[in-house]
Amino acid sequence: MERLAEEIRRRAGEAGPRLTALRRHLHRHPEPAWGEYLTASLVARALQDAGFRLTLGANALRPSARPRQPEAAFCTAQSGRALNEGADPTLVACMAGGLTGLWGDLDLDSPGTPEDERGPLVAFRFDMDANAGITEATDKDHFPAAQGFASCHAGCMHACGHDGHVALGVELARLLGGLRDELSRHLSGRIRLIFQPAEEEGEGAPGMVAAGAVDGVRALFGLHLSMQASRSGDLVCGTDKFLATTNFEVFFTGQSAHAGLAPHEGRNALLAACTAVTNLLAIARHGQGASRINVGEMHVNETPNIIPAKAWLRGETRGENGDINGYMLAEARRVVDGAARMHGCRSRFLCQSHCPGAMSSPELVDLVERTARDMGSFREVRRKADFWASEDFGWFMNKVQEDGGLAAYLQLGADRPDGHHTSHFTFDESVLPRGLELLARLAVAALARRPD
């Protein structure tokens, strides 16, 4: 196994230029939630080339389990753009309707091995979508702009590192696939690489869980670049305190009227929405744990001389657990209803998506920590960090843990000049080979692990 570890390190180092090139290609061509056709097409082809058995389309993501169905016009536009940018038409056709999730399996057991003699199923999850609503900076001090790989799509950019996540997943497939014969001599079982759409919207995981993406998984790993591991060379081995969260939208309906001649005949939906926003942000925070609320969008399409009859807003609640998030959501509903009634309007409150809270399995965190320390290439290895954010990876984690498996969420340290979800976000690409080596060694360690 020592020789195998040395070979993994060698191959991970050689993958550096490919990791950088793929990350930059993906960064240049970002795709929003449910529109990841180009990205998923590249991933699917790479998985097939590496010898992984591919599952995609409706087999990988159950449409009815999605919190929200993307509009047909959006899917047509996104898939058409992906085809123009080089996506495989056959693969894109399999993803019609925004079914851009997929996974690949590498089987290390001999053909015909009885089911009860097969080794464990170990899985890794990588998110693919970019951030809609952010236009990337173009000034010369912004590294992607200076190097010529800033986003070519206005209003969409990789501002959270998912381009790096996908690059790691693709090269992990290449590395493990290239070592399949060697791995099969030492290990038994199956390695699954899951590529998930729509993480930024908190919408992608439920459909993949419903399609069986993590059924039977004994060890599951998720990864994020930087976050609390904000320095290159650092590693957080496990993440706790994922906040439960719910995204919501509210439609206000009032009565239009001439703003000069008969304002008294109107019922101002914009005023109701503004009142709601002010009071949503004033909801008392919960005394028994972290709680959050935010309103990020509000739209009205009316001229200045007409009392607005319609208004729309979108926001989110978060809580340290499901009960606390439930409290914030109930209070939000109460506030919205009161604001609408105050101004003689009606409101419709719709929940769009939900992510549960989650915690990393201590046993798997132990495995990550031992593996990272054995590598000897991390500057600081931290056992755990509290996330205080939300991630729909929690759906995968909870499913695996409920079925008796283990799950952990790693944070790979990377220097960055600005925060996540900002127009100047980028990260230190030199950390990618180290991250690739860690993931490959975790695959080996998890397959070799035996329950206590």
Image: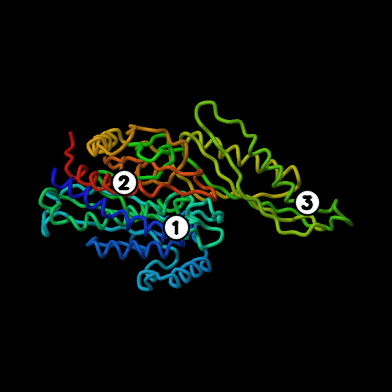
Find disc 2 in the rendering and name its residue.
435
Find disc 3 in the rendering and name its residue.
267
**Residue at the top extreme of this rendering:** 287
The span from disc 1 to disc 2 (Cα, nearest Å) is 18 Å
Residue shown at the point (34%, 50%) measured from the top left: 125
Q: Is residue 204 left or right of residue 303?
A: left
Neighbourhood count class around disc 1 (C-alpha, 10 Å): few under 14, some 14–19, many 20 upward: many
Find disc 1 in the rendering and name its residue.
27
The type of residue carrying mark 1 is His
The span from disc 2 to disc 3 (Cα, nearest Å) is 57 Å
Neighbourhood count class around disc 2 (C-alpha, 10 Å): few under 14, some 14–19, many 20 upward: many
Image location (x, y in percent) of residue 109: 14, 54
Image location (x, y in percent) of residue 161: 43, 50
Quarter of the image for residue 102 reads: bottom left
Image location (x, y in percent) of residue 437: 26, 47
Mark 3, secondary structure of its residue: loop
**N-terminal-most mark, 3 or 1:** 1
Image location (x, y in percent) of residue 322: 46, 37
**N-terminal-most mark, 1 or 2:** 1
Residue shown at the point (42%, 33%) measured from the top left: 386
Residue 84 or 389: which is nearer the viewer? 84
Mark 2, secondary structure of its residue: helix
The type of residue carrying mark 3 is Arg
> In which quadrant will I find the N terminus?
top left
The type of residue carrying mark 2 is Gly
Mark 1, secondary structure of its residue: helix
